[in-house]
Amino acid sequence: MEDREWIARFAAALGAPAPTDAEYEALLALAGTAAHASARTAAPVSCWVAGRAGVSVEEARRVAETVTSEGRAAP
């Protein structure tokens, strides 16, 4: 089963809409930011935190990039 089909089935089983193509790509970008700034496990958990916080994926990615930049600047 392809990834988007699985996600659509998972969303339906949870009673939620599947992400649009744009949302899907934004989630992958957020996950990529988290995974490249930290351990790979940060990718799925960052997406969970964004959902839990109720912010848009775009806002979550902006915050993730800020956190990443601040982490690079720390001694």
Image (cartoon, rainbow, N blue to C red):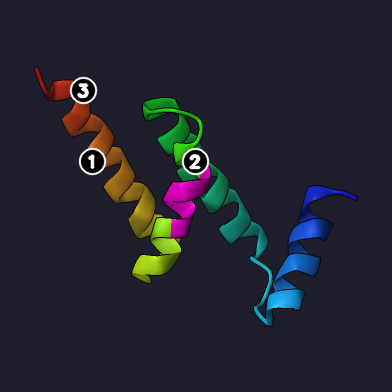
| Magenta extent | 44-48
Residue pointed to by mark 3 = 72
Amino acid marked by disc 1: Thr
First in sequence: mark 3 or mark 2?
2
Other-residue count near label 1 (Cα within 10 Å), few / some / many at <14 / 14–19 / ≥20: few
Work out whether mark 2 precedes mark 1 in sequence or the reverse, and give the earlier one: 2
Compared with 69, 24 (above or below) is below
Which residue in the protein does label 2 denote? 43
Q: Nearer the viewer, residue 25 or 34?
A: 34
Q: Do the residues labelled 3 and 2 touch (CB within 8 Å)?
A: no
Q: Do the residues labelled 3 and 1 touch (CB within 8 Å)?
A: no
Q: Hey, which quadrant is residue 73 in on the image?
A: top left
As measured in the structure, the alpha-carbon distance from the residue carrying label 3 to the one carrying label 1 is 10 Å
Q: Where is residue 41 in the image (x, y as percent from the top left)?
A: 50, 36
- How many marks on residues? 3
Mark 3 is on which residue type? Arg
